Amino acid sequence: MLPEFNLQGKTALITGGGRGIGRAIALVFAEAGADVAVTARSAAQVQSVAAEIEVMGRKGVPLVCDVADSAQVDSAVAEATRKLGKIDILVNNAGAATVGPVVPVPDVPDDVDWRWPADQRMSDDTFRQIFATNLDGSFYMARAVAPQMIERRSGKVINIASTSANLAFPYEAAYAPSKAAVQMLTKVLALEWGPYNVTVNAISPGWFKTEMTEPGFKDPAIAEARVKSLPLRRLTDLRELGLLALYLACPAADWMTGQVIVLDGGESAIAYAN
């Protein structure tokens, strides 16, 4: 293995690590030699992923945590640090998504998988819950982990944003702004922590098949149209996203900070017409 892509002796904490993107990143990191703590709200999910990590010969630490709760975040970081000795890499992946109108609109499209009745407006709780998980959770985790990284003058923070942060689509009035905020948080923290050799970067994934995005692929015709709209005309495996995260976590990316890398099959290169 190239030494620049080796995580031997490193430790990582990955939020939303019980399934989907977080699980894929956790397994790639373990394969590259890291010990990994994974958090999620589901004990069964994180225990399953931790067991997979242990089978690979690395230490897996399952932690139940709701990242929207700063007290739970502080507790999880303390526990991960106790069990792993330190946290070299933080991946803020935990996220929530919702699709629906801000207010009732006429001529509702048939192909939208509404998360609440289309004749109702978006509630305060729905709006805040999306921001609490996507933005607040990333902030809380970074705030909790950064002091030890700054003290050691070494650390990697990787935030998972979304192409929705840059490509505006209707019915994402909570999700898209929350992910745009994650991108800006990435840049601000990169400036604050760069002098201490702590890098902060983000990945903005496009369409990947996960438990969260499954509703968007339920209709075969819509799924086919979505894939055909991509310049590469295909989806890819979550492992590819894990490998990109690995690059950002490794010494190979030591001089990269404050960047948002898009992995979307070319979708963001398209000039969408209004």
Image (cartoon, grey):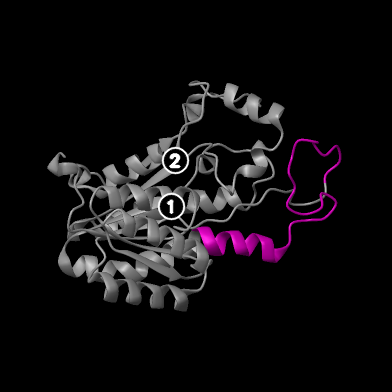
Confirm whether the magenta stretch covers residue 108. yes
Q: Is residue 54 above or below residue 169?
A: below
Residue at label 1?
23
Q: Is residue 22 above or below residue 66?
A: above
Tell which of 220 and 114 is nearer to you. Answer: 220
Furthest-left residue in this view: 3
The reply to whether discs 1 and 2 touch (Cβ–Cβ < 8 Å) is: yes
Image quarter (top left, top right, bottom left or bottom right) of the C terminus: top right
Q: Earlier in the sequence, mark 1 or mark 2?
A: 1
Which residue is rendered at x = 65% and y = 60% of the image?
127
State whether the magenta stretch is mostly helix, strand or loop: loop
For mark 1, does the 10 Å Cα neighbourhood hold few (<14), some (14 to 19), or many (20 or more) residues? many
Residue at label 2?
238
Amino acid tagged 1: Arg
Q: Quadrant of residue 9?
A: bottom left
Q: Is residue 183 visible?
A: no
Q: Which residues are magenta?
A: 105-134
Confirm whether the magenta stretch covers residue 177. no
**Callout 2: SS:** helix
Give the alpha-carbon distance from disc 1 to disc 2, as whole Å. Answer: 9 Å
Amino acid tagged 2: Leu
Q: Position of residue 265 (x, y in %)?
A: 47, 28
